[in-house]
Image (spheres, rainbow, N blue to C red):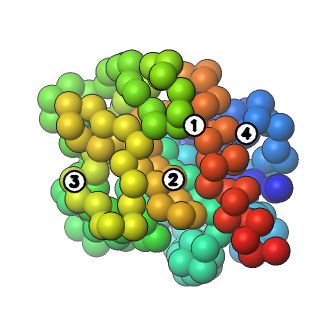
Amino acid sequence: MKVGVLALQGDVREHINSLFDCGVEAVAVRRASEIQSVDALVLPGGESTTISQLSEVFGVYQLIKERIASGMPVYGSCAGMILLAEEILDAKVGQKSFGGLEIAVRRNAFGRQIDSFESDIEFADGSTDLMKAVFIRAPWVERVSDSVQILASVDSHPVAVRSKTALATSFHPELSGDDRIHRYFIEQVARPALEKVK
Ligand code: GLN
C-alpha cells in the first residue's frame, strides 16, 4: 500500500514518519500525478483554509475531492478533519472542504476555551489503554450522520470519527509519538477498503 501525505502546508514529515513506523510506503504528494499514484491519502494538521486554497493554486482541489468521493481511503488530523467535513461551522468566509465525511465540524472549537492541551482519551480500537492526544486549536464534531461512527470523545464532544473509507481526529497523533491511530487507519480503514476494490 502506498500512502500519500498531502504536502501543501502542515506537519507532513511527522505523518510520513508515523506511517513508516507502521511499515507502509509513505510519500509527500502535491501534484496531480503524485496524488493519482497513491492508494490512500493523509491530510495533515496545519491550517485548513491555507491547505484548501493551495490545493486550488496547485490545481488539485477537484482531483482530491473526486478521489475521496470515489472511496479512496483517507485520514485527516485536525485541519485534515475540517477538510473532510461536509459542513464547517465557524468557517472562514468562502472556506471550502474536500468533503467525504458526513459530519459537521466546529473550527477552533476548543480554542475558545484553551488554545492547546493534552488529554488521555479512550479510543475505540479494542484496546483499554488510554491514548495521549494533543489538541492544538482543535475542532470538534458537532453532528454526524448514520454512516459515521464515533471512536473517541472529550467532554462528550466527538474528537475521532470514521466512515467506511474515511477517518478523522481533532487531535494530532503524528505529534505524540504513538502510532495507534495510523495503525488503525492502515489496518481497519484503508486495507479493508482497498481489499474490496481488488
Ligand atoms: N484551527 C486550524 C484550522 O482551522 C486547525 C489547527 C490544527 O490543525 N492544529 O485549520
Q: Which residue is found at the position 84% from the left and 47% from the top?
A: 25
The residues bearing labels 2 and 4 have C-alpha atoms spaced at a distance of 15 Å
- Callout 1, which amino acid? Ile
The residues bearing labels 2 and 3 have C-alpha atoms spaced at a distance of 16 Å
Q: Say which residue label 1 marks.
A: 181
- Callout 2, which amino acid? Leu
Q: Which residue is found at the position 54% from the left and 78% from the top?
A: 69
Q: Say which residue label 2 marks.
A: 167
Front-most of residues 180 and 42: 180
User: Crowdedness of circle 4 by 10 Å Cα count: few (<14), some, many (20+)?
Assistant: many
Q: Does label 2 point to a residue whose CB lies under 8 Å from ligand 1? A: no
- Element at label 1: helix
| First in sequence: mark 2 vs mark 1 | 2
Front: mark 2 or 4: 2
Front-most of residues 192 and 100: 192
Q: Outermost residue, left direction?
A: 113
Q: Say which residue label 3 marks.
A: 142
- Callout 3, which amino acid? Glu
